[in-house]
Image (spheres, rainbow, N blue to C red):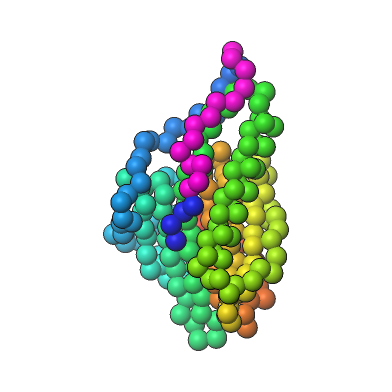
Amino acid sequence: MKAVLGLGGLVLVVGLLGCPIYHINTLPASKELDEPAAEPVSGSYQHRSGVRFPEHIDQFARVSITRYDTASLNVGVGYNRVQADCPGVLTVNVSPAPRVTHLGGARDMVRGMEWGYLQHYFSATQAEIERHHPQSFIYSAEEVPPLSGEWLPGMQATYGVGSSTSLARCYIFDHTWFFKLRLTLPATCDADASSELSRVIETLWPAA
């Protein structure tokens, strides 16, 4: 469940000298851990990004919180649903996107760069699924609505993995964070999987 960081350490300045700065990335310095570390958290866990991870999401129970860096910027959270007719596994990752400082008048350029970052992240996520499940096959890859009207659309891929269906959805938000969710459940009960993933997002991040 480790995030695919790719370009995550890059710092960019976009715009013309003298233009007012309207966004500055203020995340603290952090280093990747040699080994992932479990976060011993009871109760609700709130990430620096504002994403909130309760102990339960409907019938999903939180089973793990893992951090991959010293400042807990890159975290993965696992949930399981033990349900006889439709068990499920949900993983969620929040990690820093490439660091961008952009100046007044450069908004369209920044959106274009962020869209490129999201495509790179989404492609790396797909490659990771296919590497771990070489017999998987892709049903679809498509845009999904943004978390907020001012941000970029997300990307979602739907895979067949044996007798299961697996959805992977990726976003970039607040010019700062990658947000990735993956839901895997039996193909016999996957009809509402995309809507279920959207409901999960509403719980994790009520601003969605």
Comparing 197 with 124, the one in front is 124
- Left or right: 110, with 65 as reference point: right
In this view, 5 is above or below 56: above
Q: Position of residue 77 (x, y in %)?
A: 42, 60
Q: Is residue 51 visible?
A: no
Residue 9 part of the magenta-drawn span: yes
Name which residue lies at 51% across and 42% down.
7
Instruction: Name the residue at the left extreme.
Output: 40
Comparing 167 with 46, the one in front is 167
Q: Position of residue 65 (x, y in %)?
A: 37, 60
- Left or right: 173, with 47 as reference point: right
Comparing 190 with 115, the one in front is 115
In this view, 25 is above or below 65: above
Q: Is residue 55 visible?
A: yes
Instruction: Name the residue at the top extreme.
Output: 18
- Left or right: 122, with 51 as reference point: right
Name which residue lies at 43% across and 57% down.
2
Q: Quadrant of residue 13?
A: top right
Name which residue lies at 58% across and 60% down.
126
The prevailing secondary structure element of the residues shown in magenta is: loop
Q: Which residues are magenta?
A: 5-18
Residue 11 part of the magenta-drawn span: yes
In this view, 27 is above or below 18: below
Q: Position of residue 95 (x, y in %)?
A: 46, 48
Q: Position of residue 168 (x, y in %)?
A: 58, 62
Q: How many marks?
A: 0
Image quadrant containing the N terminus = bottom left
Name which residue lies at 56% across and 71% down.
134
